[in-house]
Every structure is written in C-alpha cells, then in structure tokens.
Image (cartoon, rainbow, N blue to C red):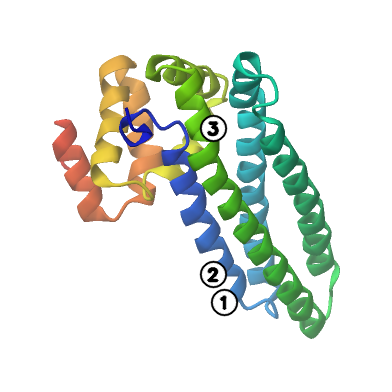
C-alpha cells in the first residue's frame, strides 16, 4: 500500500507551521521597526511564534522519535541531529531579537531588525527542508514500522500531553492552513469523541479567530452547528 493513503502524523501541524512561518517572515519584512511600539509588538509576536516552533520540536522528540527508536534503533538519529541544528538557530535568533530590543535609536533598531529578518528567513528555509525530510523519509519509516492505529495512538498521547492553552495555539496554526475537508475531519473527530465544551472552545478560540467568515460558516454548517451571527 502506498503511504499516500496511510495516516499522516505530520501533515496538519506542518501545514500550520509553514503558513505561520511565511506570515511571520512577511511581518518581519514589512514592519516599521523605526516605530518603537510597532517593533515591540512584532517582537512579541515573534517570541510567541518561536516558542510554538520550539515546542513542536520537543513534542516530536518526546513522542515520535522514541517510538521510531523503539522499533528500529537509529531510525531517528538524522532527525535528532537536525533538531540539534535547529536548537542552535533558536539561540542565534534569540541573540538577534535581543539586539533589536536593545537598540534605542530608530535607525539602529531598523538595521538590527533587517539582520533578524535575514536570519529568520534562513531558519524558515531550513525548517521547510527538515519538515520535508520528516514527511517523506521519516514518514515512510513510520508507515513501515507502525500501523495507522499505532500512529494515531502516538499522536493522541502527544496531544493529550499538551496544556489547553498550547493545544489551542496549535489549533489556531493548523485550521487556516489545512484544506476544508481536513479541517472538517479534525473538528468532526473532536465533536464525536470529546465533551461538547471542548468543541465549543476550539470553535471560539481557534476556528473563529483564524478563519475568514465564509470559511468559518461553511465549517459550522458542515459540522451541523448554528451559523455565526
């Protein structure tokens, strides 16, 4: 069986990260860093974005990589090395963010922000390549070593380990980035297996803020829920 028909543990979250990376890069490029208030707001947004990106790596290290190593020792070695490289990039970005925050003159702040923009672009490009490696080579190993049900159990354990605020933040990344059918399947699964208040929270705190009104109303209709006012 082709892996194209198998369960994909990476697809939704990686789509979300790709969209969020692209939006963040655009924001770093078009922000007015000479304006101190706007600079502070963009850097706070970047802090939140990098926190989620780093959390995503830890989730994979805590759940997916050990599962791979348990079935085939060495199967996650290349992924772990790529994650270590990402860790170094996070450190570089943190230093550049501090340089922007520490610049008091508008011209100096704008110059430091451009250095940050360039570094984030490299980080994004490397992460895109890394996610492709995971969605091709690593996913092929997962599909060879685990059934779809086993992969869903790994993902379930990962998601179940997240605090509600972090879970909602990742939902907010994924929902605008995935196809309507994928979006419906994700929320229908929540509707059919979780208490109603969980679905309501996802609708109000992840779907409504992240989706255009028309897409949001189509989602509600397909879920059999009342349309938004």
Q: Which is more toward the observer, 138 or 105? A: 138
Please indicate whether residue 136 sits to the left or right of residue 163 in the image: left
Along the horizontal axis of the image, is 215 left or right of 169? left
- Asked if marks 2 and 3 touch (Cβ < 8 Å), the reply is no
Question: Marks 3/1: CA distance?
Answer: 29 Å
Residue pushed farthest bottom? 107
Do labels 3 and 1 touch, CB within 8 Å? Answer: no
State the SS at label 1: helix
Residue 28 image point, x, y percent: 61, 69
Mark 1: give few (<14), some (14-19) or many (20+) Cα within 10 Å: few
> Circle 2 sits in a helix, a strand or a loop, which is it?
helix
Residue 40 horizontal/vertical position (percent): 69, 64
- For image coordinates 40% across by 41% down, the residue present is 206
Residue 79 falls in image quadrant: top right
What residue does disc 2 label?
Answer: 26
Residue beneath label 3, please? 165
**Residue visible at 72% across and 66% down in the picture:** 119
Q: Is residue 2 above or below residue 209?
A: above
Q: Which mark is residue 30?
A: 1
């Amino acid at each position: 069986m082709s892996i194209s028909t198998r369960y994909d543990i990476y697809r939704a979250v990686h789509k979300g990260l790709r969209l969020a990376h692209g939006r963040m890069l655009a924001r770093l490029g078009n922000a007015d860093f000479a304006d101190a208030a706007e600079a502070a707001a963009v850097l706070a947004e970047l802090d939140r974005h990098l926190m989620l990106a780093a959390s995503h790596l830890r989730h994979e290290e805590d759940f997916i990589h050990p599962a791979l190593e348990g079935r085939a020792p060495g199967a996650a070695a290349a992924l772990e090395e790529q994650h270590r490289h990402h860790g170094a990039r996070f450190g570089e970005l943190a230093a550049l963010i501090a340089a922007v925050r520490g610049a008091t003159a508008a011209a100096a702040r704008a110059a430091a922000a451009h250095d940050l923009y360039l570094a984030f672009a490299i980080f994004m490009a490397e992460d895109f390549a890394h996610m492709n490696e995971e969605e091709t080579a690593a996913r092929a190993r997962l599909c060879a070593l685990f059934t779809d049900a086993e992969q869903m159990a790994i993902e379930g354990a990962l998601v179940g380990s997240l605090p509600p605020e972090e879970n909602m933040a990742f939902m907010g990344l994924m929902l605008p980035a995935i196809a309507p059918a994928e979006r419906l399947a994700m929320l229908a699964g929540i509707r059919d297996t979780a208490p109603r208040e969980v679905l309501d929270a996802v609708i109000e705190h992840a779907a409504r803020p992240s989706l255009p009104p028309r897409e949001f109303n189509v989602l509600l209709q397909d879920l059999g829920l009342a349309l938004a006012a």
